[in-house]
């Protein structure tokens, strides 16, 4: 794709932008050298430093970090005199001049490094929205597309003992064939929005592993460990010291060792008992540790079973919008604040919409015993007939699963949100569902579907994607986008498939502090009224196994421009962006605390 010759990309329809990346599982638990902090930046609004006229990424400009001199060709930039941005962090909320900036921006920093003989070194980027190209000391080491998933690039040959510099160009241009596509109802925060670090590994190392409790048991743990470069027959040891359990398995031809452990008396992970075990994995000269919870999740008829027992998901949807300061969530404090509110609500479930969130979120959910729906950015109208878009979506799905496959809190992968039912859409998403099932057979696969139309007085949930899903997510806005709040009282729902239903969105907007009648739009009372009618309906909805209303906190969205009310924010939050709880928060809190939806399930 090429916009006005300025922003062109070297990918053909067949080729993905992502190159030379790997993805290290458990990277946040490995010893690392942090590159967080202040980086110099230069904006490149016409993309002329990043892309050549034919659309290829250039290596000859800012990537070289040249210094102005008095001889030769003039150097017309100087990182050392350029302003600073904090990493992690989106650029939009750090500098007023960058607030609306979408396009390429160059980051640079110097650092000292002590090279260790025999070790391989990777640069880990937690997320760069939306495309990134990484150079170490002027050598291009990798490129990545996808704004919400991590990547690692090997820099062993380009990093030096002593002084180094790293340059990362991040391009936040929205792309028609991207995932997500051109339009979203959230702010396109650009930049190095998550942690950046260097990770040192031996020549052969564990890049991926998965351990889970087998369904139908409370003692059988299965999984795999993959060791890059390991000759067949290499020993892999997995141990859980707290219960004196150790097993040794051996890699096959492809570097994968199959793991099985039996542990009597294992304490199962779940809400109310978020037990995590320290797990140690050792293979050849590599060793890593993680904290892992063991639980099963499955579907039986229209029920969701957690550790074999029905569970009701008292949830809330969330964007990765930072409380109080806006921008992307990227600190422990952001995560603590958000989860503090989740606990206040008496929720046991969060829908992390509409893209994978910072890994701190799923770590925190693991520690607190909060169940998680994790989603890819296949939002509404992406290019379902475009094979390139499918490949990109598949890549982002793989990266999401791989990063969080050992987080007990994550019980569901969502492959999409509100996609129009068509042959092309269903074929596209069916492939993602199949992929999710094959890459992770231990979890449920879902998608948030559009509200069904009213036919003969009934809402018939019959989306053609439903057949492939384990759990059917339904977004509905009775009382906000559709009809009046009280229409919920008489709504009749018909579920075509005998599968669990989660109402993955409902709600309405309110400006915190705007008080008045419940029939006046945008008052806190009107939002609370929508919630009351909704909850009455949901208490009787057939097959309902959970809800995640829209949404915990107000968030920035460029298309929400009602002066004095929205001012650039989607106001459907139960809490304002400044942390003020609205009346509807308490309505939902009461419903969750009283168990009105659960019908006796935990
Ligand atoms: C939806 C979308 C969500 C929007 C929300 C809204 O159905 O899934 O991304 O933000 O509605 O507020 O309109």
Image (cartoon, rainbow, N blue to C red):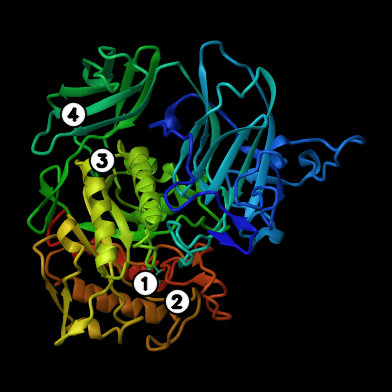
Q: Horizontal placement of 57 versus 518: left or right?
A: right
Q: Nearer the viewer, mark 4 or mark 1?
A: 4
Q: Which mark is residue 584?
A: 1
Q: Nearer the viewer, mark 4 or mark 2?
A: 4
Q: CA distance from mark 4 to mark 1?
A: 43 Å
Q: Mark 4 or mark 2: which comes first in sequence?
A: 4
Q: Mark 3 or mark 2: which comes first in sequence?
A: 3
Q: Which mark is residue 510?
A: 2
- Which quadrant holds residue 469? bottom left
The x, y position of residue 367, in whole percent, is 34, 39
Q: Residue furthest front?
A: 54
Q: Mark 1 or mark 2: which comes first in sequence?
A: 2
Circle 3 sits on which residue?
439
Q: Horizontal placement of 482 versus 493: left or right?
A: right
Q: Nearer the viewer, mark 3 or mark 2?
A: 3
Q: CA distance from mark 4 to mark 2?
A: 48 Å
For the residues bearing labels 1 and 2, Cβ distance under 8 angstroms: yes
Q: Nearer the viewer, mark 1 or mark 3?
A: 3
């Amino acid at each position: 794709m090429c916009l006005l010759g300025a922003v062109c990309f070297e990918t053909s329809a067949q080729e993905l932008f992502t190159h030379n990346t790997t993805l290290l599982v458990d990277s946040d638990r490995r010893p690392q050298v942090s590159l967080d902090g202040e980086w110099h930046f230069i904006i490149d609004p016409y993309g002329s430093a990043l892309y050549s006229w034919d659309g290829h990424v250039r290596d000859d400009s800012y990537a070289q970090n040249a210094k102005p001199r008095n001889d030769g060709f003039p150097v017309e930039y100087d990182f050392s005199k350029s302003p600073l941005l904090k990493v992690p962090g989106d650029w939009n909320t750090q500098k007023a001049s960058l607030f609306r900036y979408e396009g390429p921006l160059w980051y640079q920093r110097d650092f000292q490094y002590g090279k260790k003989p025999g070790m391989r070194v990777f640069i880990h980027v937690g997320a760069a929205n939306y495309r990134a190209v990484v150079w170490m000391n002027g050598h291009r080491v990798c490129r990545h597309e996808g704004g919400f998933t991590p990547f690692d690039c090997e820099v062993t040959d380009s990093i030096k003992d002593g002084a180094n510099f790293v340059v990362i160009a991040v391009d936040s241009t929205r792309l028609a064939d991207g995932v997500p596509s051109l339009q979203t109802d959230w702010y396109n925060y650009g930049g190095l929005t998550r942690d950046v670090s260097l990770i040192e590994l031996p020549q052969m190392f564990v890049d991926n592993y998965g351990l889970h409790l087998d369904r139908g048991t409370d003692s059988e743990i299965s999984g795999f460990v993959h060791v890059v470069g390991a000759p067949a027959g290499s020993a892999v040891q997995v141990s859980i010291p707290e219960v004196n359990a150790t097993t040794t398995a051996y890699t096959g031809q492809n570097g994968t060792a199959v793991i099985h452990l039996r542990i009597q008396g294992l304490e199962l992970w779940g809400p109310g008992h978020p037990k995590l075990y320290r797990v140690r994995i050792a293979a050849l000269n590599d060793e890593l540790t993680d904290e892992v919870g063991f639980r099963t999740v499955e579907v039986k008829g229209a029920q969701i079973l957690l550790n074999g027992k029905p569970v009701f998901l008292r949830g809330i949807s969330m964007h990765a919008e930072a409380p109080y300061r806006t921008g992307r969530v990227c600190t422990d404090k952001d995560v603590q604040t958000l989860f503090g509110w989740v606990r206040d609500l008496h929720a046991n479930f969060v829908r992390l919409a509409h893209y994978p969130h910072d890994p701190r979120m799923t770590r925190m959910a693991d520690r607190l015993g909060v169940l998680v729906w994790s989603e890819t950015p296949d939002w509404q109208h992406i290019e379902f007939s475009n094979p390139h878009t499918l490949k990109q979506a598949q890549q982002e799905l793989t990266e999401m699963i791989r990063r969080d496959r050992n987080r007990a809190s994550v019980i569901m992968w969502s492959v999409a949100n509100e996609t129009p039912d068509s042959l092309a859409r269903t074929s596209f998403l069916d492939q993602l569902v199949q992929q999710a099932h094959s890459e992770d057979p231990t979890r449920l696969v879902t998608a948030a579907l559009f509200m069904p139309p009213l036919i003969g007085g009934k809402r018939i949930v019959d989306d053609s994607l439903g057949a492939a899903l384990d759990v059917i997510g339904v977004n509905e806005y009775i009382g906000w986008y559709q009809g009046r709040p009280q229409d919920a009282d008489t709504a009749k729902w018909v579920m075509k498939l005998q599968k669990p239903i989660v109402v993955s969105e409902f709600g309405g907007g309110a400006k915190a502090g705007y008080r008045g009648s419940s029939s006046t739009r945008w008052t806190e009372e009107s939002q609370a009224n929508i919630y009351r009618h909704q909850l009455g309906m949901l208490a009787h909805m057939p097959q309902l196994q959970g809800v995640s209303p829209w949404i915990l906190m107000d968030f920035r969205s460029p298309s929400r421009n009602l002066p004095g009310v929205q001012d650039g924010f989607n106001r459907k939050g139960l809490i304002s962006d400044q942390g003020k709880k609205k009346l509807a928060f308490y309505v939902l809190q009461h419903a969750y605390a009283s168990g009105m939806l659960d019908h006796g399930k935990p």
